[in-house]
Each structure stands twice: as structure tokens, then as C-alpha cells.
Image: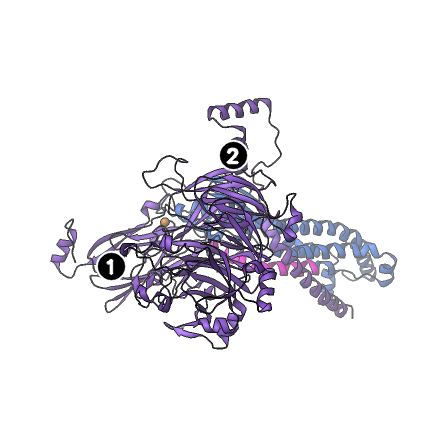
Amino acid sequence: MSRLIQAIIGPRVPADELRSRPARYLTPTFMFMVARILLLVSVFFPYWHMELEAPQYPKGLYLTAYINHLSGDVREIDGLNHYIGMRPLGEAAKFERSVAVWAVIAMFLLVEGAAFVHTRWAVVLAIPAIAFPAGFLIDLYFWMRTFGLNLDPDAPLSSSVKPFVPTVLGEGGIGQFKTYADLGSGYWLAVAAAVLTIIGFIFHRRAYKPLFERMHREASAKGGAP
Amino acid sequence: MRISSSIRAAGRLAIVLALAGSVLGIFAESADAQEGRRRRTGQDARPIELTPEQVTQITKVANDRRLNSDDLIAAAKTFMPSGRHDEYVLFSSGGQCGQVFAIGVPSMRLLRSIAVFTPESWQGYGFAGDADPVTESLKINGYPVLWGDTHHPALSETKGDYDGEFLFIGDKANARVAVIDLRDWETKQIVKNPLTISDHGAAFVTPNTDYVIEGGQYATVLGYGYAPPEDYKKSYRGMVTLWKFDRAKGRFDVPNSFALELPPYWQDLADAGKNASDGFFFINSFNVEMATGGVEKGNPPFEAGASKRDMDYLHIIDWKKAEAAFKAGKAKPINGFPVLMLDTLIADGILYFAPEPKSPHGVDVTPNGQFMVVAGKLDPHVTVYSIEKIKAAIASGKRAGSDEYGVPILDFDSVVETQVELGLGPLHTQFDDKGYAYTSLFLDSAVARWTLGGEYAKLNPEQPWKLVTKTPVHYNIGHLCAAEGDTVSPDGRFLVSMSKWSVDRFLPTGPLLPQNFQLIDIAATGTAMPVIYDSPIGVGEPHYAQMIKADKLKTWLVYPEIGWNPHTQKLDPNAPKKGDEGVTRQGNKVLVKMTAVRSHFFPEHVEVNEGDEVTWRITAIETAQDATHGFCIGGYNINLSLEPGEYTEFRFIADRPGTYPFYCTEFCSALHLEMMGYFHVKPKTPVAAAQAIAPGTDSR
Ligand SMILES: [Cu+2]
């Protein structure tokens, strides 16, 4: 059992080795730490915005998506959407929003774990954090598409507005509204976390590969399986 | 060991992260407000330089329209590009229309009216069925009085400066005072004076709005009593009422309000002292002759009898002493309202008179509170009183005598600072920031600019207490209003002449002509003081107005919460919420719970039986600015204005059988015409049904 654990978490750094080359071993740990913090902090920042522009809304209407809630002129946008038969925004991605914060905490802990694992298994632990930004966008697109294509056929304006896929990024339009959508600072924090994690692995590999190989050599010298 | 230390490290890290997270969370709040906001193209406010082509173009337009260069400059000073907001709001009385007008300055555009003493259907004011709180508030002794004569608006003040929270206005015809809340610009309370039928000296506020002053006018028997004119001196009395204002509640605190009995002279306008004269207020009077008219019996008419003597009395009232006397229980009830009687006023040194040139109109206190300016009306001077001299005269115990009622009269020469000759018919005075006073000259049809003395003398190049210039106005100016011109810190810049006659200024509108509000640019010193805009007011005869810097107003854009009751200024627990609409019945009582949102009412059919008592509650579940709905039931005299978030309840007896479409009376959306429903009143008998559908038949 302990051998299996050792096989997964890999070699520990000997104390004298760490003292002689601290930067080599602390760099990946530090980068993972920063990545974790960025990811956690992103929870507080918006991931995505949409602005709707129309003559009678001179200040515009805003929709802001955090990973766990929507804010902005949700009520007004829902009110307008009822004319074309779109479901209330609050019904979209309910499950995702309810688990999002826990998922981020889990990713945080996994990346923290990755710093303690000195083998290739570390990458497996970090995969969710690395894939997270792309996953967010895919999910957003899925919901926009689902909502846009499933309009209530009995809505007041259904004869003049056909089902459509709202623009997830960039400029779009519906009726007298122009829409502008872009990614928020929270999203970019998550992207930065993913990129830092990837770079962290370059340093991770540089630091621990020699140790890992030495452990192997020593193990085979002793005649035991690694 | 390593593991336990890393657990500890992780624990520390978690604390640090939690702290950082909460800090960032605060940041994120503002990020949410700012992020993703596209820059909007606003008004191009960069300095311009006209090209020769543009100069040619402007010159051509001016010549085609017969405008001279002064006209072009006046237009440039007043024109508001689309979307640009005015710098000031003029709150003007509406005279006999019973409303208040809000007008933007310098554009002079009417922003809106505020219904006060007269039902007004656009605002749904007084059209909410039986037992409508508005209709109830308009009743006097149980009888509906459906109009008022609004005269003097008063903005609430803090330390003598407008604070933009409340507006008070008096109804001269019926002696009522109203409170308007400037968060939603709606009338919240109307109090009827229990002593007198009509008044004139309302409303004026003390420097911190502790009290709103309502001065009377035509003496009567206090408490709506009766006495023949022969008993005038014995039984008729004047009065002034101090309405205690509870700012937190936004209502008058009636139990802590009281009045002062005054001799039966006709008290006129009032003004509260401030700074040097804080604690006093001043009221003019006329008809100290106590003429009782009777032109039909061969007596001199009032206009002659009440102007016989050369002097009337400026009333000097120490309201802090009056308040102390009231709190000491010295008031006597008249018609259930506490009144400090004349003997108390004299004994406690609350009331003094100072002679003033006959039949004056306005008494206006300078911003520093040192001088009281009394305009002569029938005397070409303004008479300036000094508070220092008044205080010294009171303290000295020297009296020029007393009137028939024993009120001590101060010696004219010992309290007057100076007199300034301005012209014919001086009425009211306002102030600016450059040491000038402005007085309306009714007979001259002009605004006089003159210099103040004392500490004001150094603010302008002219000699103190001198007429500087007169600007003609069109015509018969009554009140005038300078920007914050009756506060402790006037702004100067703009002055509005409230001209009573417009004669030839506008296209003829039949024999009834609009008033003319003329905007005067008072920004420069000396003789430059041009009229730069004429604005017809075709809705009533305004009297006084006050002009407040627009950024002092803390106006709500929509009601703070959905289900807001403007009568209580609170969220109403009875307001129907989305999802809990419906019609329920208990015996013959029907409760309708309805919501309104673009573009439907919910429910759309309401069925009752003839004779049912209907209680109808509607919530406008809108949050967007300007998404206002109306609600009317034709034939039942019901119309509501349902502003975003507003809740209204109305009751009525469904005594007219038939099928009544109800609909939204505001063009709220593209499907506005579809925002309707049917109110079905099932007739008791088929006969009634037949009558109900027969045109021109009264089914009742
Ligand atoms: Cu409507």
C-alpha cells in the first residue's frame, strides 16, 4: 500500500538537496499556489457580460454572469424576453451554478495536491483546473443555444421572432436590441490560473524528473520493483 | 511531521485567502458595475470655434427669423441640447389649479406638475374609488373641497439652506398646507387649519424646518365661528400657525403644532429669521385700520378703508419663546387646537410690532439674517429693518406705544436701518451672491437691482443701499425668484420674474391668457440684467416659486421595492406579488389581487355581482425607469398611475352592471393596446342587464 502511494506521489526531496537548490523545487510549488489563489479569487469576479442596447434604454441593459449567480438587469431582460417566449434566465444552468463554488474549491484542493505529487500523476489532479475555462464557455454556449432555440410558440411576438442562437461573444442582435458580449475579469483570472498551472508543470517536470529517475535507479539497484 | 506542518501552513493560507477573498469581493462589487460597460457617445461638450461657413449660416438663420445678436446670446444661454439636464429646478405654485409645477432652469421647460389640492387624473390623484386616501385628505369637515389656490412653496431647509427633501405649499382659499416628498414628488399629507377658513402666509420654514409657518390673512372668528361685522374688533382675529414637522416621518406632527392669536389686522406674507435673526419670524400686515368694508351700505370699500393710514405693522415674533410658552401649557384650545392668546404673547414678550409703510406685501430676510426688507406696495421705497436694532429696542424697554390690543409697538426710527427708493409698487425681494437685492415692481413692471449694505457692501463696486438698475418685464410682476435666493447662500445667476399679465407676449389664446415666467440673467454685476426667455404658464396663476440646484434633489428613479405604497412610503404587506394574484369572495365582499407588467394585467377577467363591495389591489411589478402603467375602469371614475414598483388599493361598490373593459392608460409598450381586461358586473335581474346595454340609460 505504502509502495503504491509512493509510486503515485513520487520521491520526496532530500533536505540537503532542497537547501542547495531551493529555487528549483519551490518554483513549481509557488506557481501552483498562485494559480490556486487566482482560481479561488475568480469566484468573486464576473465571468461574462452581455450588454443590450436599444433606443429606449439609453443606459443600456446589463447581464453579468458569475460562476454561481447572475446579476444586472435580469428582471427587465426576463420581462422583455417573455415577449419572444424565452424562458427566465434564472432557469438556465441551475445545477452548474449551485455546485460551482464547491467545484472551484475542489479544483483548488486538487491543484494543492498536485504540488505534493512529484510524478506524472500530478497532471491528472490539475486537469480540471486547466480545462475549467473552456468548460465554462461550452456550458454557456449550450444554455444560450437551448434557450434561444426553444422559444414558446405562443408568445406575443413569436410570429415576428424566430428561434435563434444568441451570440455568446461579440456583437449580436435581436429585434431593436444590439447585444455585445464579452468575457469578464473572473474568467481571465481562471485562464491565468490554467496557464500558470501548465507553466508550473514545466518546472515541476524539471525539478522532479531527475529525482524520480534516481528513485527508480536506486529501486532497481536494490532489485525491487519501483 | 512534515504533513502536520503543511496542514498548519494550509490552515494559515486558508485564513489569508479568506481575508483576501473578502477584500476582493468588495472590489468585485465595483468591478461588476464598471466591467463590460461600453462607452456611450455623450454630448460633445468640447469648446467650439465657429467656421466662417457656420457664422454665415447662423447669421442667415438669425436674419430669416429676425433675431438680433442679444437674442442669439439669450438663446445660447437657455437652449438645452437633447438629453442635457437643467441646472436648477423651479418649484412654482400653480395658483387656482391647486398644483405645483416643476420647471427646469435655464431652459424653462415644464418638467411635470405635482397634484396637491386638486384631483388630477394623469397622476391618478383622487381617482381611486370610494375612500380614496387622496379624496379623504381633500375633505374639509367631511365635505369634499376639490380645488385649492396654491400660493407659496417652501423647500425644506437645513441650517437655512435648501436640503431638497420636502416641499410645502399653502392653499390660500381653504387654509391648508401640504407636504410633498421630493423622493417621489408626490403629496403625502394635507393639514387643514382648524382656526381659519382661508390664509395667505403659507408656507415658510424655520431654518432647520422645525416648523412650517402658516400665516393667516382675512380675519375671521377663529375656529370657523360666526360674528356680525359690527363685532369685528371684539370677535374677529388674525392668527399664525406653527406646524411642527417630523422629518423622519415626512409628516406634520399635529399634536405638537400650535397657533398664535393675532389682532384682526390682515396678516400677509411671512419669512423666518436666520443666522443673526434665527429664532424670530416676521409677518407683514395691512388693514390695521380694521376697516369692515360695506360698499353696498355706502361705507368706503375695503380697497380704500384698508389703506387709509400711512403705517401698518410689521409683526416681530420670537418663535422660540412661543414654543417655550406652548410647552409650558400656556395655550388655550380653540376648535381643539392649542392657541397662545394675545395676553400670553404680550406677557411673555413673544410679539412686537414695528410700524411699516402702508399696505406692504413682502418681508424678506437677507441671507445673513441681519436685515428685513419690507416692500411698500403703495410706497416707492423698500424699508430695511435691522435685527440688531430690533433686539436693542426690545431690550431697552422703550416703546412708541401699543395698539388697541396692548401689543407693544417699537419706535420706527430706532429699528429701521434705511429706506431705498426703487420705484412704483415694490412687492417682493430676493438676493444673490454679489450683495445685490432684487425687488419686483408691480406698477413699474420691472425688476429692480439694488445694493445691500453692511457686510455685503464689499461684494460689488456700487455704493450700499442704492438702486443700480431696473429691467422691464412683461407685465405686472408679482413674485420673483432668484436661484436659492431666499436661503443663507443664494447662487445668483438666474432670476425668474413671475409676470401676471402676458398681454401681447404670446399668440392669443382667447380672452384667458397665460402667465409669463421670464428668465433674467443676473450673473453679471452693474446694469447688465437682460431678460433671456419668456415661458407661458397656461395652467393657473402661479404666485411664489423657489429655485433649487438640481443636484440637491435625491429623487427616486423607480420605487425602492416592488409593492411600495406611496401613501405610507413603505413596502405594503398587502401588495399582490407575482404568483399570488386572483379574485376571492367572502359574502358580497370581493378581493381582487392583480399585478401589472408589460403588457398584461393578471388576471384579465374579474367577475362580480351587482352590488358587491370590491377591494382591488394592484402592484406594478416593473423595475425599469419610466415603465409606468395606468389602470382605468371607464364608467366607474377610476384611473390610477402605476409607477414602477407602485402598489395601489382602491375600493368601490359595483353598483353599475355591465361589461367594462379596463385598460392601461399609459402607452407602456408595443402591445399596450392589448394591456386590458374585462370587469364583468353581473346584473341582479335580467331587466337591469337590458338597461345596462341600452345606450343613454341610467341603470341606477
Ligand atoms: Cu401598460
Residue at far bottom of view: B329
Colour-to-chain, blue: A
Please tell me whether residue B325 is drawn above or below residue A5 in the rendered image: below
- Colour purple maps to chain: B
For the stretch drawn in magenta, the main secondary structure is helix
Q: Secondary structure at mark 1?
A: strand
Three-letter amino acid code at the position of disc 2 = Ala
Tell which tag, 1 or 2, sits nearer the viewer.
2
Q: How many marks?
A: 2
- Front residue of B255 and B588: B255
**Subunit of mark 2?**
B
- Residue B562 belongs to the span the image colors magenta: no
Which residues lie in the magenta part?
A88-112
Q: Answer with left or right where residue B7 lies relative to residue B330.
A: right
Which residue has dot 2 on it? Answer: B75
Is B660 or B53 nearer to us in this picture? Answer: B53
Does the CB distance between marks 1 and 2 fall below 8 Å?
no
Which mark is on residue B607?
Answer: 1
Q: Could you tell me how far apart the alpha carbons at marks 1 and 2 are, in whole angstroms?
A: 57 Å
